Image (spheres, rainbow, N blue to C red):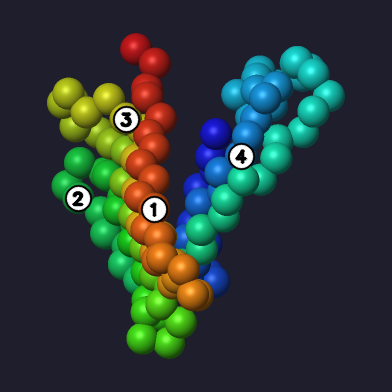
Amino acid sequence: MGVVKVDIIAKEITLELFDDICGTYTAKPGTITCLAMPILKAEYVAPLQTRKSDGCGTAIYAGKEDKRPVDGNLTAIKLVDNSSRVCEDVLRNLAEVTVVSQTAGMGGPATKKVVKASTERAF
């Protein structure tokens, strides 16, 4: 389970990944499935660099923080938001998020993670 936040004023894009064992975020309002709250597993934050829109209403946000020359870390987030799309085509996803996170080895091997997620529209 994940939550994407785009803050236009602060010019920041954030992806939070949760372990949501009770389905708190996906449950209908007023429904209590269990008492366990979602646990934050990972958070990726990057400065918002571009904000584009295509002719069909798809909004594309991209953020990147590249500190590889300083500490070896890179975070890049891309959000494709189709929730306002007006064109009728085969695109089924409301939102698609891609995160690339690379961390320095700090004495060990460097790691690189690529996280891709999407939400599907109910037809």
Q: Is residue 17 above or below residue 90?
A: below
Spatial separation of the CA atoms under disc 2 and disc 3: 16 Å
| Closer to the camera in the image, 50 or 102 | 102
Q: Do labels 2 and 3 touch, CB within 8 Å?
A: no
Q: Give the percent coordinates (x, y) of residue 39.
A: 70, 40
Which element type, helix, strand or loop, lies under badge 4? Answer: strand
Q: CA distance from mark 3 to mark 4?
A: 20 Å
- Residue at the outermost bottom position: 70
Q: Disc 4 designates what residue?
A: 18
**Residue 93 got which mark?**
3
Residue 48 appears anywhere in the view: no
Residue at image x 83%, y 24%?
35
Mark 2 residue type: Asp
Mark 3–mark 1 distance (CA, rounded to whole Å): 22 Å
| Label 3: which secondary element | strand
The residue beneath circle 2 is 54
Residue with the mark numbered 1: 113
Query: In front here: 72 or 121?
Result: 72
Name the residue rendered at 62%, 45% in the picture: 41
Question: Which residue, as the protein is rendered here, is positioned at the far top?
Answer: 123
**SS assignment at label 2:** loop
Q: Amino acid at mark 4?
A: Phe
Name the N-terminal-most of marks 4 and 2. 4
What's the amino acid at mark 3?
Asn
Q: Going from the N terminus, do you reach mark 1 or mark 4 first?
A: 4
Q: Are marks 3 and 4 in contact (CB under 8 Å)?
A: no
Please provide percent x and percent y for residue 114.
Answer: 35, 50
